[in-house]
Image (cartoon, rainbow, N blue to C red):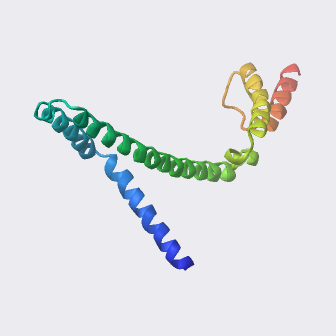
Amino acid sequence: MARRRQNNFRNLEKLSYEATRITGTSLAFVVAAGVVLLWLVTGPLFGFSDTWQLVINTGTTIVTFLMVFLIQRAQNKDALAIHLKLNEIVAAMEGASNRLIDIEDLSEAEITSLRAHYRKLIELAKTDENLTATHSVEEAVERHGTKYKRRAK
């Protein structure tokens, strides 16, 4: 039973992937534009009736409703892939703050707190001649202090 559900889920995922891939093509746009053009051309045949208008309104509403979910699915997958790539970069870089790994899973308050923490880096960077000289707040504070101690000598 669980295996069957898993297969159904995989099939649904494949279907949504293919639908996302196909609807994002130039051909899909041409087909959609063709449908609208066909609808416009048939207007005089149906006397621009309420039923004629209802056809395009219903069709576009249904397509829009379904596309919202396909677009959201594609954005969620892309965002997850980007987050994983960034996590790998942060984890692999010496001097990078590991507190940024999976930051997207933190609460709004935690993200705001980290943002305030990194604003210190911004303030320190504004006083530096080279804005790319530091990698983390801790490193920036240490370098900032050391740099100005050397200049004082």
Q: Quadrant of residue 142?
A: top right
Question: In which quadrant is the N terminus drawn?
Answer: bottom right
The one of 143 and 119 positioned closer to us in this rendering? 119
The one of 115 and 38 positioned closer to us in this rendering? 38
Question: In which quadrant is the C terminus drawn?
Answer: top right
Q: Total marks drawn?
A: 0
Q: Position of residue 33 (x, y in %)?
A: 23, 37
The one of 58 and 31 positioned closer to us in this rendering? 58
**Residue 141 shown left or right of residue 50 in the figure:** right
Q: Position of residue 65 (x, y in %)?
A: 42, 44
Q: Position of residue 120 (x, y in %)?
A: 79, 27
48 vs 81: above or below: above
Which residue is found at the position 66% from the left and 53% from the top? 92
**Residue 22 shown left or right of residue 92 in the figure:** left
150 vs 135: above or below: above
Which residue is found at the position 49% from the left and 50% from the top? 73
Which residue is found at the position 62% from the left and 50% from the top? 89
Q: Quadrant of residue 140?
A: top right
* Residue furthest to the left: 45
Which residue is found at the position 37% from the left and 45% from the top? 62
The one of 98 and 150 positioned closer to us in this rendering? 98
Q: Position of residue 21 (x, y in %)?
A: 36, 52
**Residue 18 shown left or right of residue 114 in the figure:** left
Q: Quadrant of residue 47?
A: top left
